[in-house]
Amino acid sequence: MSTLRFLRTFVAIAEHGSFAAAAERVALTHAAVGQQMRALESELGRPLFSREKRSITLRPEAYQLLPQVRQLLADYEGIVAGDKTENNVAGHVSIGAIVSGMGLLSKCLVEVAQVHPALEVTLATGRSSDLIVRVGSGELDAAVVIEDSRRPFRGIGWTHLYDEPLVLLANRGQIRRKDDFDSLLETSPFIRYDRATATGAQIERLLRRVGTRPRQILELDSILGISELVRQGVGVAIVPMLAHSGWHKDPALRVFPVPDGIYSRRVGMLEPSRKGHITGIIRRHLVGIMSNPC
């Protein structure tokens, strides 16, 4: 069983970025973590870390081992829980989701609960960046978040679920017959989505590509808040087309696709290995829902 403990420590190092952070996570001293990793390298017959004077980092081949290690630990946890085939799974997990993913996640959990009534789930919602931090700290066991190309999810499992394409949102009552994406951006007050976010940075790249400098009047970090301001006729905005938003059916709103249609944000499930035998069930069910939409 010592190898399993070593593998858990190995995953903790990958997820938290250092021996010191992993030591705190698995309740060991820094020296004990080092001893475990040397023993693991000896048992596997290969180096897992690059050791320099002031830093120790995972080698690329070590990252390639992570999926197998996570699966091995998840299988073992399933055996300990009493059922490896996912029947009668019990336990508690805390899962977060961005606002647009909460409906999908809630639907998934209702269906999972019918199969696994002893499973308890605590839900949380928030900004993607905050949820990612909470997953990394161990406060959340998994989360439905936005992929950020600026900060890759190294050492943590990621499964793509769906895309939310960028669109121009305008008030239907303020649109002239000849208006299109370009004319609305040039002539209408512009409500900008927070540039500090990955999505906000993507919107900025889009504006640079089309060569338009809109007349900005506000900058907000709430997509739903922005959509409400557009509904009230305050201005236009470029935002992700939130899943299940109903904007296309809203009589007060008009949705315009962005040029080329190549800009979108990727939403998926961020999932460490801590409770993989449970979060794996939820992930597979989410993927199933997206593969067979009603």
Image (cartoon, rainbow, N blue to C red):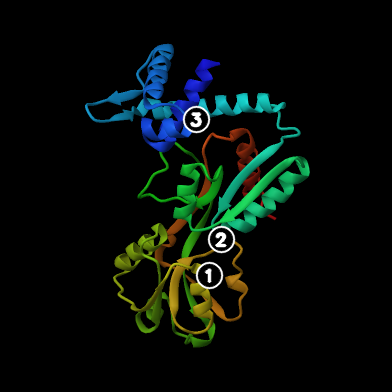
At a point 62% along the width and 27% down the height, the residue shown is 77
SS at badge 3: helix
Residue at 46% over, 54% down: 130
Q: Quadrant of residue 263?
A: bottom left
Q: Amino acid at mark 3?
A: Pro
Query: Is residue 294 rendered to the left or right of residue 225?
Result: right
Q: Residue 235: where, in percent of width, then height?
A: 44, 81
| Of the pair 18 and 174, the residue shown nearer to us | 18
Q: Which mark is residue 166?
A: none
Residue identifier under label 3: 67
**Point 35% across, 18% down: residue:** 47
Quarter of the image where the N terminus is located: top right
Residue found farthest to the left: 53
Residue 227, x across and y down, in percent: 52, 74
Crowding around mark 2 (Cα neighbors within 10 Å: few <14, some 14 to 19, many 20+) is many
For badge 2, the amino acid type reads Val
Residue at (41% x, 51% y) in the render: 148
- Element under disc 1: helix
Q: Give the class, few, some or many, for how many residues have Cα within 10 Å of label 1's Cα (few <14, many ≥20).
A: some
Marks 3 and 2 close (CB-CB < 8 Å): no
Cα distance between the residues tagged 3 and 2: 28 Å
Location of mark 2 (residue):
99
Callout 2: SS: helix
Question: Disc 1 versus disc 2: distance between alpha carbons?
Answer: 9 Å
Tags 1 and 2 touching, CB below 8 Å: yes
Q: Which residue is mark 1?
A: 224
